[in-house]
Image (cartoon, grey):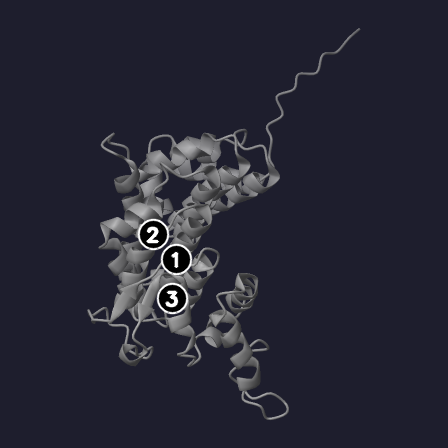
Amino acid sequence: SDCSMNDEDDDGNDGTEIWKPLMDGLRDENDPLLQMSILELLEVMDRDDLIQDWKELDPIMLRMVGMNIDTEDYDQDEPMDGTTRKFKVSSLPLHPFCAGAALRILAKRNIPLDLYRHVLLSFGRKMSGEVEKIGFVDGISTYICCQRNENNASNALKAILGERELLEEWLNLRMAQSKLKVVVMNSISTVLLSNFVQEEEGQSLCMALYQSIGDINDVGAGHSTTEIIMEYVKSQLVELRLGVYELLTAVAKNDKGAHELMRYGGFFEFLCNRNLEIVKEGKELKFDLVKSIVHSKVIGLLASEVVEKLDQVIEDGPYYVKDNRHVALSD
């Protein structure tokens, strides 16, 4: 990769000359702008480059997310088997500017599962403000989706699903402003579309994640996840509607999810109504949702007239508008 700092360059250097000043800059707490610039560089690097054996990076990132760890006790190569391991850690304040970015970088670094779970719990209790909240939400989905194999990703999602406190912070739409609601929906969509979902266990875990949205946001009103999400389709905010379409499409790509959606009263009518969405991008995303339903296994369980209407929506395309104009002829 062009942005790898671990490979030798054309002059035979091993990248140390580049890496050392970056590490020094990250340690310089008197220059937060420099720290932020270096973190921006690291964030755009490929996961395979970030996963290189730069063990000195992790303690710096951990300090930024409010955790001091004994470097002699830390082994970044520990297998991700979900087992509990004791780390010698102490609590620090979150970095006032860099905590969210540092959390996302740690997520890509594949630090041990139990340590990252501990980091998330600590981060969630200290965070304040939208920027840190966005970093927290992105940090969860990034960690799950950047695992080396399906088993590790499943273990990571299981660990998150098993922590009610983390789910409350990750999936809570009730208290969030519209921008954060979209971030949360996009984060969930990213997990639902990740590679490990191809496995049966992955599909079941993702459906458990989807159902957890209702569990966290229902507050005793008896509303299902789909009912809660569909309320946002009516929003006047375009970005929020787009987030809903992307989330529902991610759900529909899971056969169990497609079945769940089609069981919801009014969902079929929603799919067939081409007048609800007026924005071009919204029409396109909603059309993708219809295609995901039609291409799922649930289509074989639907009545023939339902299938015919959905096929007609596909044939008409995303921009179809029924012409209801009446032409008056004068003498």
> Label 2 near label 1: C-beta < 8 Å?
yes
Question: 312 and 272: which one is in front?
Answer: 272
| Mark 1 and mark 2: Cα distance apart in space | 7 Å
User: Which mark, residue 94?
Assistant: 1
Q: Residue at x 29, y 81 (%)?
A: 72
The quadrant of the image that shows the C terminus is top right
Q: Residue furthest bottom?
A: 12
Q: Residue at x 35, y 35 (%)?
A: 228
| Mark 3 and mark 1: Cα distance apart in space | 8 Å
The quadrant of the image that shows the N terminus is bottom right
User: Which mark, residue 126?
Assistant: 2
> Label 1 near label 3: C-beta < 8 Å?
no
Q: Please tell me in which quadrant of the rendered image residue 62 appears.
A: bottom left
Sequence order check: which comes first, mark 3 or mark 2? Answer: 3
Q: Secondary structure at mark 2?
A: helix
Question: 160 and 190: which one is in front?
Answer: 160
User: What is the crowding at mark 3: few (fewer than 14 residues within 10 Å), some, or many (at least 20)?
Assistant: many
| Amino acid type at mark 2 | Lys
User: Which mark, residue 63?
Assistant: 3
Q: Residue furthest front?
A: 30
Sequence order check: which comes first, mark 1 or mark 2? Answer: 1
